[in-house]
Image (tube, grey):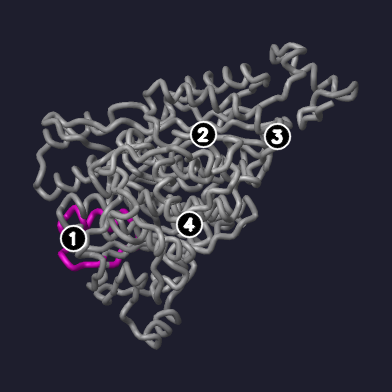
Amino acid sequence: MTTYRSDNIKAGVDRTPNVSLLYALGLTKEEISRPIIGVVSSFSEVVPGHMHLDKLTLAVKEGIYAAGGTPLVFPAIAVCDGIAMGHIGMKYSLVSRDLVADSTEAMAIAHQFDGLVMIPNCDKNVPGLLMAAARLNIPAIFCSGGPMLAGHLKDGRRTCLSHMFEAVGAYHAGKLDEAGVDDYTENACPSCGSCSGMYTANSMNCLTEAIGMSLRGNGTIPAPYSARIRLAKLTGMKIMELVERNIRPRDIMTSKAFDNAEAVDMALGCSTNTMLHLPAIAHEAGVTIDLSHANAISERTPNLCHLAPAGDTFMEDLDRAGGVYAVMGELASRGLIDTSLITATGKTVAENIAGVKNLDTSIIRPIDNPYSPNGGIAVLRGNLAPDGCVVKRSAVAPEMMKHEGPARVFDSEDDAIKTIYAGGIKPGDVVVIRYEGPKGGPGMREMLNPTSAICGMGLDTTVALITDGRFSGATRGASIGHVSPEAASGGNIALVHEGDRISIDINAYKIELKVSDEELAKRRDEWTAPEPKIKTGYLARYAKLVTSADKGAILN
Protein backbone atom coordinates (compact mmCIF):
# COMPACT_ATOMS: atom_id res chain seq x y z
CA MET A 1 0.00 0.00 0.00
CA THR A 2 1.32 3.43 -1.01
CA THR A 3 1.99 5.82 1.86
CA TYR A 4 1.88 9.59 1.56
CA ARG A 5 3.05 12.53 3.66
CA SER A 6 -0.59 13.52 4.02
CA ASP A 7 -1.18 10.31 5.98
CA ASN A 8 0.17 12.35 8.90
CA ILE A 9 -3.08 14.32 8.86
CA LYS A 10 -5.56 11.67 7.74
CA ALA A 11 -4.56 8.06 8.51
CA GLY A 12 -5.85 6.16 11.55
CA VAL A 13 -8.11 6.86 14.51
CA ASP A 14 -5.54 9.20 16.08
CA ARG A 15 -5.92 11.52 13.12
CA THR A 16 -9.71 11.62 13.00
CA PRO A 17 -9.78 15.11 14.62
CA ASN A 18 -7.61 16.31 11.73
CA VAL A 19 -9.94 14.59 9.25
CA SER A 20 -12.95 16.27 10.81
CA LEU A 21 -11.45 19.60 9.79
CA LEU A 22 -10.86 18.34 6.25
CA TYR A 23 -14.55 17.47 6.19
CA ALA A 24 -15.20 21.03 7.36
CA LEU A 25 -13.54 22.17 4.12
CA GLY A 26 -16.25 20.32 2.22
CA LEU A 27 -13.91 17.51 1.12
CA THR A 28 -15.38 14.07 0.58
CA LYS A 29 -13.95 10.83 1.91
CA GLU A 30 -12.75 10.00 -1.61
CA GLU A 31 -10.97 13.36 -1.96
CA ILE A 32 -9.30 12.95 1.41
CA SER A 33 -8.05 9.50 0.44
CA ARG A 34 -6.14 10.87 -2.56
CA PRO A 35 -2.72 12.59 -2.48
CA ILE A 36 -3.23 16.14 -1.27
CA ILE A 37 -1.46 18.77 -3.34
CA GLY A 38 -0.80 22.28 -2.10
CA VAL A 39 -1.38 24.87 -4.81
CA VAL A 40 0.56 28.02 -3.96
CA SER A 41 -1.32 30.76 -5.77
CA SER A 42 0.23 34.21 -6.00
CA PHE A 43 -2.98 35.75 -7.34
CA SER A 44 -3.25 39.44 -6.53
CA GLU A 45 -5.40 42.40 -7.52
CA VAL A 46 -2.39 44.66 -6.88
CA VAL A 47 0.17 43.28 -9.34
CA PRO A 48 -0.45 43.27 -13.14
CA GLY A 49 1.71 40.17 -13.45
CA HIS A 50 -0.58 38.35 -11.02
CA MET A 51 -4.05 39.66 -11.80
CA HIS A 52 -4.86 36.61 -13.94
CA LEU A 53 -3.37 33.91 -11.72
CA ASP A 54 -6.81 33.04 -10.35
CA LYS A 55 -7.60 31.54 -13.77
CA LEU A 56 -4.32 29.61 -13.85
CA THR A 57 -5.01 28.39 -10.33
CA LEU A 58 -8.34 26.94 -11.45
CA ALA A 59 -6.63 25.30 -14.42
CA VAL A 60 -3.94 23.77 -12.19
CA LYS A 61 -6.67 22.41 -9.90
CA GLU A 62 -8.44 20.86 -12.88
CA GLY A 63 -5.20 19.15 -13.90
CA ILE A 64 -4.62 17.77 -10.40
CA TYR A 65 -8.19 16.46 -10.18
CA ALA A 66 -7.88 14.89 -13.64
CA ALA A 67 -4.74 13.01 -12.57
CA GLY A 68 -6.23 11.73 -9.32
CA GLY A 69 -5.14 14.24 -6.71
CA THR A 70 -6.88 16.68 -4.40
CA PRO A 71 -5.74 20.31 -4.68
CA LEU A 72 -5.87 22.76 -1.80
CA VAL A 73 -5.02 26.40 -2.55
CA PHE A 74 -3.15 28.80 -0.31
CA PRO A 75 -1.61 32.22 -1.09
CA ALA A 76 1.83 33.71 -1.55
CA ILE A 77 2.47 37.45 -1.58
CA ALA A 78 4.07 39.37 -4.42
CA VAL A 79 5.37 42.94 -4.69
CA CYS A 80 5.09 44.76 -8.02
CA ASP A 81 8.55 46.27 -8.41
CA GLY A 82 7.26 48.82 -10.91
CA ILE A 83 4.63 50.19 -8.55
CA ALA A 84 7.08 50.06 -5.62
CA MET A 85 9.78 51.88 -7.63
CA GLY A 86 11.15 55.25 -6.59
CA HIS A 87 9.85 55.45 -3.01
CA ILE A 88 10.15 53.64 0.32
CA GLY A 89 8.10 50.75 -1.02
CA MET A 90 11.08 49.48 -3.01
CA LYS A 91 12.81 48.63 0.27
CA TYR A 92 10.21 45.86 0.63
CA SER A 93 10.78 44.19 -2.73
CA LEU A 94 13.85 42.01 -2.14
CA VAL A 95 12.87 41.33 1.46
CA SER A 96 9.55 39.89 0.28
CA ARG A 97 11.48 36.98 -1.27
CA ASP A 98 12.23 35.57 2.17
CA LEU A 99 8.69 36.15 3.41
CA VAL A 100 7.44 34.11 0.45
CA ALA A 101 9.85 31.27 1.18
CA ASP A 102 9.22 31.23 4.92
CA SER A 103 5.43 31.41 4.71
CA THR A 104 5.31 28.65 2.09
CA GLU A 105 7.50 26.47 4.31
CA ALA A 106 5.13 27.07 7.22
CA MET A 107 2.02 26.14 5.24
CA ALA A 108 3.53 23.09 3.55
CA ILE A 109 4.86 21.51 6.73
CA ALA A 110 1.88 22.45 8.89
CA HIS A 111 -0.52 20.75 6.47
CA GLN A 112 1.70 17.88 5.25
CA PHE A 113 1.08 18.21 1.52
CA ASP A 114 2.23 15.39 -0.72
CA GLY A 115 3.32 17.78 -3.43
CA LEU A 116 3.26 21.44 -4.39
CA VAL A 117 2.37 23.36 -7.52
CA MET A 118 3.83 26.86 -7.38
CA ILE A 119 2.07 29.61 -9.36
CA PRO A 120 4.36 32.66 -9.27
CA ASN A 121 5.19 35.35 -11.78
CA CYS A 122 6.92 38.52 -10.65
CA ASP A 123 10.38 39.42 -9.53
CA LYS A 124 10.90 38.13 -5.96
CA ASN A 125 7.90 35.86 -5.86
CA VAL A 126 9.54 33.38 -8.29
CA PRO A 127 12.87 32.96 -6.45
CA GLY A 128 11.05 32.94 -3.11
CA LEU A 129 8.99 29.94 -4.19
CA LEU A 130 12.05 28.25 -5.71
CA MET A 131 13.81 28.71 -2.37
CA ALA A 132 10.82 27.17 -0.61
CA ALA A 133 10.74 24.22 -3.00
CA ALA A 134 14.44 23.53 -2.46
CA ARG A 135 14.14 23.92 1.32
CA LEU A 136 11.09 21.67 1.67
CA ASN A 137 12.29 19.08 -0.86
CA ILE A 138 8.90 17.54 -1.48
CA PRO A 139 7.74 16.97 -5.09
CA ALA A 140 7.11 20.38 -6.65
CA ILE A 141 6.62 21.98 -10.04
CA PHE A 142 6.12 25.54 -11.28
CA CYS A 143 3.58 27.17 -13.59
CA SER A 144 4.29 30.88 -13.84
CA GLY A 145 1.88 33.54 -15.05
CA GLY A 146 3.79 34.42 -18.21
CA PRO A 147 4.95 37.68 -19.81
CA MET A 148 2.96 40.74 -20.77
CA LEU A 149 2.52 41.54 -24.44
CA ALA A 150 4.56 44.39 -25.87
CA GLY A 151 2.84 47.76 -26.08
CA HIS A 152 2.32 49.90 -29.19
CA LEU A 153 2.69 53.67 -29.30
CA LYS A 154 0.34 55.80 -31.41
CA ASP A 155 2.89 55.86 -34.24
CA GLY A 156 3.04 52.06 -34.32
CA ARG A 157 6.38 51.57 -32.53
CA ARG A 158 6.46 48.73 -30.02
CA THR A 159 7.25 49.69 -26.46
CA CYS A 160 7.60 48.38 -22.91
CA LEU A 161 8.14 49.39 -19.29
CA SER A 162 11.84 50.26 -19.66
CA HIS A 163 10.92 52.72 -22.42
CA MET A 164 8.33 54.20 -20.05
CA PHE A 165 10.92 54.94 -17.36
CA GLU A 166 13.34 56.32 -19.94
CA ALA A 167 10.58 58.59 -21.23
CA VAL A 168 10.62 60.36 -17.85
CA GLY A 169 14.34 61.07 -18.28
CA ALA A 170 13.70 62.32 -21.81
CA TYR A 171 11.00 64.65 -20.46
CA HIS A 172 13.34 66.13 -17.85
CA ALA A 173 15.97 66.62 -20.58
CA GLY A 174 13.45 68.50 -22.73
CA LYS A 175 13.44 65.76 -25.38
CA LEU A 176 9.80 64.69 -24.86
CA ASP A 177 6.66 66.68 -24.07
CA GLU A 178 3.76 65.74 -21.79
CA ALA A 179 1.75 64.31 -24.67
CA GLY A 180 4.68 62.04 -25.51
CA VAL A 181 4.90 60.89 -21.89
CA ASP A 182 1.14 60.21 -21.90
CA ASP A 183 1.54 58.06 -25.02
CA TYR A 184 4.04 55.84 -23.18
CA THR A 185 1.98 55.87 -19.97
CA GLU A 186 -1.17 54.65 -21.68
CA ASN A 187 0.47 52.08 -23.96
CA ALA A 188 3.65 50.68 -22.40
CA CYS A 189 1.90 47.96 -20.38
CA PRO A 190 -1.08 46.73 -22.41
CA SER A 191 -2.00 43.42 -20.73
CA CYS A 192 -1.69 41.21 -17.70
CA GLY A 193 1.61 39.43 -17.19
CA SER A 194 5.17 40.12 -16.13
CA CYS A 195 6.60 43.11 -18.02
CA SER A 196 7.38 42.25 -21.63
CA GLY A 197 11.19 42.45 -21.77
CA MET A 198 13.92 40.24 -20.33
CA TYR A 199 13.55 41.86 -16.95
CA THR A 200 13.87 40.08 -13.61
CA ALA A 201 10.49 38.32 -13.57
CA ASN A 202 10.83 36.88 -17.05
CA SER A 203 14.49 36.09 -16.41
CA MET A 204 13.57 34.01 -13.37
CA ASN A 205 10.65 32.32 -15.11
CA CYS A 206 12.94 31.35 -17.99
CA LEU A 207 15.58 30.08 -15.56
CA THR A 208 12.93 28.03 -13.74
CA GLU A 209 12.45 26.27 -17.06
CA ALA A 210 16.21 26.02 -17.67
CA ILE A 211 16.95 24.54 -14.26
CA GLY A 212 14.28 21.91 -14.84
CA MET A 213 11.50 22.92 -12.42
CA SER A 214 8.74 23.56 -14.96
CA LEU A 215 7.30 22.39 -18.26
CA ARG A 216 8.23 23.83 -21.64
CA GLY A 217 6.93 27.33 -22.25
CA ASN A 218 6.86 28.38 -18.61
CA GLY A 219 9.18 31.30 -19.25
CA THR A 220 7.81 32.58 -22.55
CA ILE A 221 4.15 31.77 -23.33
CA PRO A 222 2.43 35.19 -23.11
CA ALA A 223 0.12 35.62 -20.15
CA PRO A 224 -3.05 36.33 -22.19
CA TYR A 225 -2.66 33.23 -24.43
CA SER A 226 -4.86 30.19 -23.96
CA ALA A 227 -1.70 28.10 -24.23
CA ARG A 228 -0.85 29.37 -20.73
CA ILE A 229 -4.08 27.83 -19.38
CA ARG A 230 -3.28 24.54 -21.11
CA LEU A 231 0.20 24.67 -19.57
CA ALA A 232 -1.39 25.10 -16.14
CA LYS A 233 -3.59 22.04 -16.63
CA LEU A 234 -0.63 19.95 -17.79
CA THR A 235 1.39 21.16 -14.79
CA GLY A 236 -1.39 20.06 -12.46
CA MET A 237 -1.33 16.63 -14.07
CA LYS A 238 2.46 16.40 -13.95
CA ILE A 239 2.72 16.93 -10.20
CA MET A 240 0.93 13.65 -9.68
CA GLU A 241 3.61 11.83 -11.67
CA LEU A 242 6.33 13.54 -9.63
CA VAL A 243 4.60 12.48 -6.39
CA GLU A 244 4.24 8.86 -7.53
CA ARG A 245 7.87 8.71 -8.72
CA ASN A 246 9.06 10.73 -5.70
CA ILE A 247 11.07 13.10 -7.89
CA ARG A 248 12.01 15.96 -5.60
CA PRO A 249 13.42 19.47 -6.13
CA ARG A 250 16.90 18.55 -4.89
CA ASP A 251 16.96 15.67 -7.39
CA ILE A 252 16.49 18.34 -10.06
CA MET A 253 18.26 21.42 -8.65
CA THR A 254 21.74 19.96 -8.50
CA SER A 255 25.05 21.77 -8.90
CA LYS A 256 25.10 20.90 -12.60
CA ALA A 257 21.53 22.17 -13.01
CA PHE A 258 22.58 25.54 -11.59
CA ASP A 259 25.45 25.58 -14.11
CA ASN A 260 22.85 24.98 -16.83
CA ALA A 261 20.74 27.83 -15.48
CA GLU A 262 23.70 30.21 -15.47
CA ALA A 263 24.62 29.23 -19.03
CA VAL A 264 21.06 29.95 -20.20
CA ASP A 265 21.19 33.18 -18.17
CA MET A 266 24.27 34.26 -20.15
CA ALA A 267 22.78 33.26 -23.49
CA LEU A 268 19.49 35.06 -22.87
CA GLY A 269 21.01 38.22 -21.37
CA CYS A 270 19.00 38.00 -18.16
CA SER A 271 18.62 40.51 -15.35
CA THR A 272 21.51 41.12 -12.95
CA ASN A 273 19.09 40.14 -10.17
CA THR A 274 19.63 36.52 -11.15
CA MET A 275 23.06 36.88 -9.53
CA LEU A 276 21.23 37.45 -6.22
CA HIS A 277 18.59 34.80 -6.65
CA LEU A 278 20.47 31.81 -8.05
CA PRO A 279 22.93 31.71 -5.10
CA ALA A 280 20.02 32.06 -2.65
CA ILE A 281 18.07 29.21 -4.29
CA ALA A 282 21.22 27.09 -4.48
CA HIS A 283 21.86 27.67 -0.77
CA GLU A 284 18.45 26.18 0.03
CA ALA A 285 19.26 23.20 -2.19
CA GLY A 286 22.56 22.58 -0.38
CA VAL A 287 24.62 23.88 -3.32
CA THR A 288 27.19 26.68 -3.07
CA ILE A 289 27.53 29.14 -5.95
CA ASP A 290 30.51 31.45 -5.89
CA LEU A 291 29.69 34.74 -7.57
CA SER A 292 32.88 34.69 -9.64
CA HIS A 293 31.88 31.30 -11.08
CA ALA A 294 29.53 33.28 -13.29
CA ASN A 295 32.53 34.70 -15.17
CA ALA A 296 33.86 31.24 -15.98
CA ILE A 297 30.47 30.29 -17.43
CA SER A 298 30.21 33.64 -19.19
CA GLU A 299 33.59 33.24 -20.85
CA ARG A 300 32.49 30.05 -22.60
CA THR A 301 28.84 30.94 -23.22
CA PRO A 302 27.92 33.27 -26.09
CA ASN A 303 25.12 35.81 -25.78
CA LEU A 304 22.38 34.78 -28.25
CA CYS A 305 19.49 37.13 -27.41
CA HIS A 306 19.04 40.89 -27.17
CA LEU A 307 15.56 41.29 -25.76
CA ALA A 308 14.49 44.57 -24.17
CA PRO A 309 16.17 46.46 -22.57
CA ALA A 310 19.24 45.28 -24.54
CA GLY A 311 17.35 45.33 -27.83
CA ASP A 312 13.96 45.95 -29.40
CA THR A 313 12.51 42.44 -29.22
CA PHE A 314 10.22 41.05 -26.56
CA MET A 315 9.22 37.86 -24.77
CA GLU A 316 6.45 37.08 -27.24
CA ASP A 317 9.12 37.08 -29.97
CA LEU A 318 11.29 34.66 -27.99
CA ASP A 319 8.29 32.39 -27.55
CA ARG A 320 7.58 32.32 -31.29
CA ALA A 321 11.24 31.58 -31.97
CA GLY A 322 11.14 28.41 -29.87
CA GLY A 323 11.56 29.73 -26.35
CA VAL A 324 13.98 28.58 -23.71
CA TYR A 325 14.26 25.07 -25.14
CA ALA A 326 15.45 26.47 -28.47
CA VAL A 327 18.15 28.46 -26.65
CA MET A 328 19.13 25.33 -24.73
CA GLY A 329 19.29 23.44 -28.01
CA GLU A 330 21.79 25.95 -29.37
CA LEU A 331 23.90 25.64 -26.22
CA ALA A 332 23.70 21.84 -26.23
CA SER A 333 25.03 21.73 -29.78
CA ARG A 334 28.36 22.96 -28.37
CA GLY A 335 28.22 20.94 -25.17
CA LEU A 336 27.64 24.06 -23.07
CA ILE A 337 24.93 22.49 -20.90
CA ASP A 338 24.58 19.08 -19.26
CA THR A 339 21.70 17.30 -21.00
CA SER A 340 21.71 14.19 -18.79
CA LEU A 341 19.92 15.82 -15.86
CA ILE A 342 16.43 14.84 -14.69
CA THR A 343 13.75 17.56 -14.77
CA ALA A 344 10.21 18.15 -13.53
CA THR A 345 8.93 16.80 -16.84
CA GLY A 346 10.01 13.40 -15.59
CA LYS A 347 12.49 13.31 -18.48
CA THR A 348 16.08 14.44 -19.00
CA VAL A 349 17.12 17.72 -20.55
CA ALA A 350 18.17 15.80 -23.67
CA GLU A 351 14.73 14.24 -23.98
CA ASN A 352 13.07 17.62 -23.42
CA ILE A 353 14.95 19.44 -26.17
CA ALA A 354 15.04 16.61 -28.71
CA GLY A 355 13.67 17.87 -32.02
CA VAL A 356 13.30 21.47 -30.83
CA LYS A 357 14.23 23.98 -33.54
CA ASN A 358 15.34 27.60 -33.51
CA LEU A 359 12.53 29.09 -35.59
CA ASP A 360 13.85 32.65 -35.88
CA THR A 361 17.58 33.29 -35.95
CA SER A 362 17.00 37.04 -35.74
CA ILE A 363 15.60 36.51 -32.22
CA ILE A 364 17.78 33.59 -31.07
CA ARG A 365 21.08 33.89 -32.84
CA PRO A 366 22.75 30.61 -33.87
CA ILE A 367 25.58 29.50 -31.65
CA ASP A 368 28.11 30.28 -34.44
CA ASN A 369 26.80 33.84 -34.92
CA PRO A 370 26.20 35.28 -31.44
CA TYR A 371 25.88 38.89 -30.38
CA SER A 372 29.08 38.37 -28.43
CA PRO A 373 31.31 35.38 -27.65
CA ASN A 374 30.77 35.87 -23.94
CA GLY A 375 27.66 36.00 -21.79
CA GLY A 376 25.23 38.75 -20.92
CA ILE A 377 26.37 39.23 -17.29
CA ALA A 378 29.83 40.04 -15.92
CA VAL A 379 31.13 40.07 -12.35
CA LEU A 380 33.76 42.76 -11.72
CA ARG A 381 36.31 42.86 -8.89
CA GLY A 382 38.83 45.37 -7.63
CA ASN A 383 39.50 47.55 -4.61
CA LEU A 384 36.07 49.19 -4.94
CA ALA A 385 34.36 45.80 -4.83
CA PRO A 386 36.73 43.16 -3.40
CA ASP A 387 33.89 40.63 -3.14
CA GLY A 388 32.45 41.51 -6.52
CA CYS A 389 29.84 43.59 -8.30
CA VAL A 390 27.58 42.84 -11.25
CA VAL A 391 26.75 44.42 -14.62
CA LYS A 392 24.43 43.39 -17.46
CA ARG A 393 27.14 43.45 -20.12
CA SER A 394 24.75 42.76 -22.99
CA ALA A 395 22.94 46.05 -22.30
CA VAL A 396 26.08 48.23 -22.16
CA ALA A 397 27.04 50.44 -25.09
CA PRO A 398 30.34 49.36 -26.72
CA GLU A 399 32.02 52.66 -25.87
CA MET A 400 31.29 52.11 -22.16
CA MET A 401 32.92 48.71 -21.86
CA LYS A 402 35.98 50.65 -20.68
CA HIS A 403 35.51 53.91 -18.84
CA GLU A 404 37.28 56.16 -16.37
CA GLY A 405 35.85 59.27 -14.80
CA PRO A 406 35.31 61.35 -11.67
CA ALA A 407 33.06 60.06 -8.92
CA ARG A 408 29.81 61.89 -8.19
CA VAL A 409 28.92 60.58 -4.74
CA PHE A 410 25.43 60.25 -3.23
CA ASP A 411 24.42 58.60 0.02
CA SER A 412 20.94 57.68 -1.23
CA GLU A 413 19.03 57.09 -4.45
CA ASP A 414 16.80 60.05 -3.62
CA ASP A 415 19.71 62.51 -3.56
CA ALA A 416 21.09 61.10 -6.82
CA ILE A 417 17.85 61.35 -8.75
CA LYS A 418 17.36 65.00 -7.76
CA THR A 419 20.77 65.89 -9.17
CA ILE A 420 20.24 63.81 -12.32
CA TYR A 421 16.86 65.39 -13.07
CA ALA A 422 18.35 68.85 -12.43
CA GLY A 423 20.99 68.25 -15.12
CA GLY A 424 23.83 68.02 -12.62
CA ILE A 425 25.50 64.95 -14.15
CA LYS A 426 27.91 65.55 -17.01
CA PRO A 427 29.40 63.27 -19.70
CA GLY A 428 32.28 61.25 -18.27
CA ASP A 429 30.93 61.18 -14.71
CA VAL A 430 30.73 58.03 -12.59
CA VAL A 431 27.64 58.25 -10.36
CA VAL A 432 28.13 56.42 -7.04
CA ILE A 433 25.01 55.64 -4.97
CA ARG A 434 25.78 54.02 -1.62
CA TYR A 435 24.11 52.97 1.64
CA GLU A 436 21.45 51.24 -0.47
CA GLY A 437 22.71 47.66 0.04
CA PRO A 438 20.86 44.77 1.72
CA LYS A 439 21.79 46.01 5.21
CA GLY A 440 22.22 49.73 4.54
CA GLY A 441 19.04 50.32 2.56
CA PRO A 442 17.80 48.25 4.14
CA GLY A 443 16.40 46.05 1.41
CA MET A 444 18.69 46.88 -1.51
CA ARG A 445 16.47 49.11 -3.63
CA GLU A 446 16.40 48.89 -7.42
CA MET A 447 17.81 51.96 -9.19
CA LEU A 448 15.63 52.01 -12.28
CA ASN A 449 14.71 55.67 -11.88
CA PRO A 450 18.29 57.03 -11.97
CA THR A 451 19.51 54.60 -14.64
CA SER A 452 16.50 55.30 -16.85
CA ALA A 453 16.92 59.04 -16.36
CA ILE A 454 20.55 58.79 -17.47
CA CYS A 455 19.51 56.80 -20.56
CA GLY A 456 16.56 59.03 -21.35
CA MET A 457 18.84 62.08 -21.21
CA GLY A 458 21.17 60.48 -23.73
CA LEU A 459 24.00 59.98 -21.22
CA ASP A 460 24.13 56.19 -21.31
CA THR A 461 27.13 56.22 -23.67
CA THR A 462 29.17 58.57 -21.46
CA VAL A 463 28.09 58.07 -17.82
CA ALA A 464 28.45 55.03 -15.54
CA LEU A 465 26.51 54.33 -12.34
CA ILE A 466 27.84 52.22 -9.47
CA THR A 467 25.86 51.19 -6.38
CA ASP A 468 25.68 48.73 -3.51
CA GLY A 469 21.99 48.61 -4.34
CA ARG A 470 20.67 46.73 -7.33
CA PHE A 471 18.97 47.31 -10.67
CA SER A 472 15.76 46.39 -12.35
CA GLY A 473 16.06 43.94 -15.19
CA ALA A 474 14.77 46.89 -17.24
CA THR A 475 18.01 48.79 -16.62
CA ARG A 476 20.50 49.31 -19.44
CA GLY A 477 23.78 51.14 -19.72
CA ALA A 478 26.98 50.88 -17.67
CA SER A 479 25.01 50.25 -14.48
CA ILE A 480 27.09 48.29 -11.96
CA GLY A 481 25.34 47.03 -8.83
CA HIS A 482 25.63 44.65 -5.89
CA VAL A 483 28.96 46.24 -4.81
CA SER A 484 30.27 44.00 -2.03
CA PRO A 485 31.07 44.61 0.75
CA GLU A 486 28.37 47.30 0.91
CA ALA A 487 28.89 50.74 2.41
CA ALA A 488 26.95 50.02 5.61
CA SER A 489 29.33 47.13 6.33
CA GLY A 490 32.38 49.32 5.84
CA GLY A 491 33.07 48.39 2.23
CA ASN A 492 35.39 50.66 0.27
CA ILE A 493 32.44 52.19 -1.54
CA ALA A 494 31.82 54.04 1.76
CA LEU A 495 35.25 55.67 1.42
CA VAL A 496 34.80 57.21 -2.06
CA HIS A 497 35.10 61.01 -2.15
CA GLU A 498 33.62 63.40 -4.68
CA GLY A 499 35.96 63.65 -7.66
CA ASP A 500 37.92 60.42 -7.04
CA ARG A 501 38.78 58.68 -10.30
CA ILE A 502 37.11 55.32 -10.91
CA SER A 503 38.22 52.96 -13.67
CA ILE A 504 35.92 50.30 -15.18
CA ASP A 505 36.95 47.54 -17.61
CA ILE A 506 33.97 45.22 -18.05
CA ASN A 507 35.51 42.65 -20.37
CA ALA A 508 38.57 42.44 -18.11
CA TYR A 509 36.20 42.07 -15.11
CA LYS A 510 37.91 44.95 -13.25
CA ILE A 511 36.74 47.96 -11.28
CA GLU A 512 39.22 50.21 -9.45
CA LEU A 513 39.06 53.25 -7.23
CA LYS A 514 42.17 55.24 -8.14
CA VAL A 515 43.11 55.99 -4.54
CA SER A 516 46.19 54.64 -2.76
CA ASP A 517 45.96 52.00 -0.07
CA GLU A 518 47.45 54.49 2.36
CA GLU A 519 44.77 57.07 1.65
CA LEU A 520 42.01 54.45 1.92
CA ALA A 521 43.41 53.35 5.29
CA LYS A 522 43.34 56.98 6.49
CA ARG A 523 39.74 57.39 5.31
CA ARG A 524 38.74 54.15 7.01
CA ASP A 525 40.12 55.41 10.32
CA GLU A 526 37.94 58.50 9.94
CA TRP A 527 34.79 56.61 8.84
CA THR A 528 31.97 55.79 11.22
CA ALA A 529 29.02 53.60 10.40
CA PRO A 530 25.83 55.62 10.02
CA GLU A 531 22.78 55.05 12.17
CA PRO A 532 20.33 52.51 10.72
CA LYS A 533 17.77 54.24 8.51
CA ILE A 534 14.93 52.11 9.85
CA LYS A 535 14.88 50.88 13.47
CA THR A 536 11.50 49.15 13.78
CA GLY A 537 9.46 46.51 12.02
CA TYR A 538 10.38 43.86 9.50
CA LEU A 539 13.04 45.92 7.72
CA ALA A 540 14.93 46.45 10.98
CA ARG A 541 14.90 42.71 11.68
CA TYR A 542 15.93 42.01 8.09
CA ALA A 543 18.92 44.37 8.30
CA LYS A 544 20.23 42.47 11.33
CA LEU A 545 20.01 39.07 9.59
CA VAL A 546 20.87 39.73 5.93
CA THR A 547 24.20 38.77 4.39
CA SER A 548 26.12 40.46 1.60
CA ALA A 549 24.85 40.67 -1.98
CA ASP A 550 27.65 38.41 -3.22
CA LYS A 551 26.18 35.65 -1.01
CA GLY A 552 22.71 36.18 -2.51
CA ALA A 553 21.52 38.44 0.34
CA ILE A 554 20.38 35.36 2.23
CA LEU A 555 19.35 35.53 5.88
CA ASN A 556 21.54 34.10 8.63
- Tell me: 52 left or right of 480: right
Q: Which residues are magenta?
A: 409-430
Task: Place residue 313 in its image quadrant.
Answer: top left
Which of discs 2 and 4 lies nearer the camera? The answer is 2
Is the Cβ of the residue at disc 2 closer than 8 Å to that at disc 4?
no
Q: Judge from the rendering whether residue 99 lies leftward or rightward of residue 517; answer left or right.
A: right
Q: Which residue is mark 4?
A: 438
Nearer-the-camera pick, 348 or 100: 348
Amino acid type at circle 2 is Leu
- Residue picked out by circle 1: 461
Q: Could one spot residue 500 in this view of the protein?
A: yes
Sequence order check, earlier mark of 2 and 1:
2
Q: Which residue corresponds to the image point at 33% horizontal and 76% vertical from the top-left?
A: 513
Going from N to C along the chain, the mark reached first, 1 or 4, is: 4
Say if 384 sits above or below 123 in the image. below
The amino acid at mark 4 is Pro
Which residue position is annotated with label 2?
Answer: 215
Q: Which residue is mark 3?
A: 245
